[in-house]
Amino acid sequence: MKKIKAGFAALIFAAIMLLNGCSILTSQPAHPGQTDTQEAITGEKHTDSLKTQGDDDEIIDWGDDDEIIDPDEFDEIGANEKYEDGDWTFVKLDNGSWEASSYKGSDANVTVPQKFRDGAVTEVGVWCFRDNKNVKHVAVPDCIVVIGENCFMGCENLESVQMPQHLNFMGDQTFSGCRSLKRCVVPEGVKELDYRQFDECGNLGEVILPSTLTLIGEAAFRHCYNLRTIYFRGSDADWKGVKISGNALIDSDYRLVTGYTGT
């Protein structure tokens, strides 16, 4: 009889525990911050914020959908970016000035621009006029301090170039192959005539060199068969200090005039 009562009590206790467990399960909401009733009525889950896994306090902010981006922010041109304007292509330099990078026009008389957009043009780029068969006369303004290598290379009909007074550097082969060029004035401040600077300028008759010159590089005047006069603005002693490569003037029967003050 005692065994029957004990078994009956155990059965009642199990039934009570089972009923309590069901109550606990049905009382938990389906999502934090949301009740079963809310989801049942709206059909939507409550998602005011999204929490990342592993950090209950970190909330991802997706930003403001109404944020407006100013299109003027994309109108700025950074360094080394190209910009085309008619026959010219310009490149923004690191110092804020511009390089006239290339000229694709067909004019016989060309003047390099002094300014572009927000700054001065200070350089004429590598290959800027290369192989242009139309150009005959080029005026380079005084704001130009650098003329890149091969700038006028292969301009067979180029007869004259007005050089800038403040030029301090010319790259290799600047006038190589300019067979119609008859005269050139290299401005004060230039220190070197680099490799093949006037190579194959067959009609070059005279050149005026600055007193600042320290080097006439390899093949600088090669194949300049008609070069008759070199005018040097420095003294005889200055000329002796100029390093001249062995084949720089090998094809020229020229006379040297030092202390030149003409134009």
Image (tube, rainbow, N blue to C red):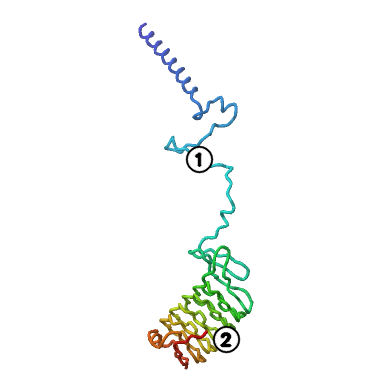
Residue closest to the far top: 1
Q: Is residue 204 left or right of residue 213?
A: right
Q: Nearer the viewer, residue 237 or 220?
A: 237
Give the SS element for disc 2: loop
96 lies left or right of 9 = right
> Residue at left 56%, top 72%?
102
Regarding mark 1 in the picture, which secondary structure is present there?
A: loop
Residue 237: % across, % down: 38, 87
User: Going 57% across and 81% down the picture, which residue do you hit?
Assistant: 155
Question: Picture coordinates of residue 39 (x, y %)?
Answer: 56, 28
Q: Mark 1 belongs to which amino acid?
A: Asp
Which residue sits at x=42%, y=16%?
Answer: 14
Q: Of 7 and 146, which appears nearest the observer? A: 146
Q: Which residue is mark 1?
A: 61
Indicate the amino acid at tag 2.
Answer: Ser
Up/down of 31 relative to 2, above or below: below
Local crowd size for mark 1, using a 10 Å CA cut-off: few (<14), some (14–19), many (≥20): few
Disc 1 and disc 2: Cα gap in Å?
69 Å
Disc 2 crowd rating (10 Å Cα; few below 14, some 14-19, many 20+) is some
**Mark 1 vs mark 2: in front:** 2
The residue tagged 2 is 180
Q: Nearer the viewer, residue 40 or 14?
A: 40
Tag 1 and tag 2, C-beta contact below 8 Å: no
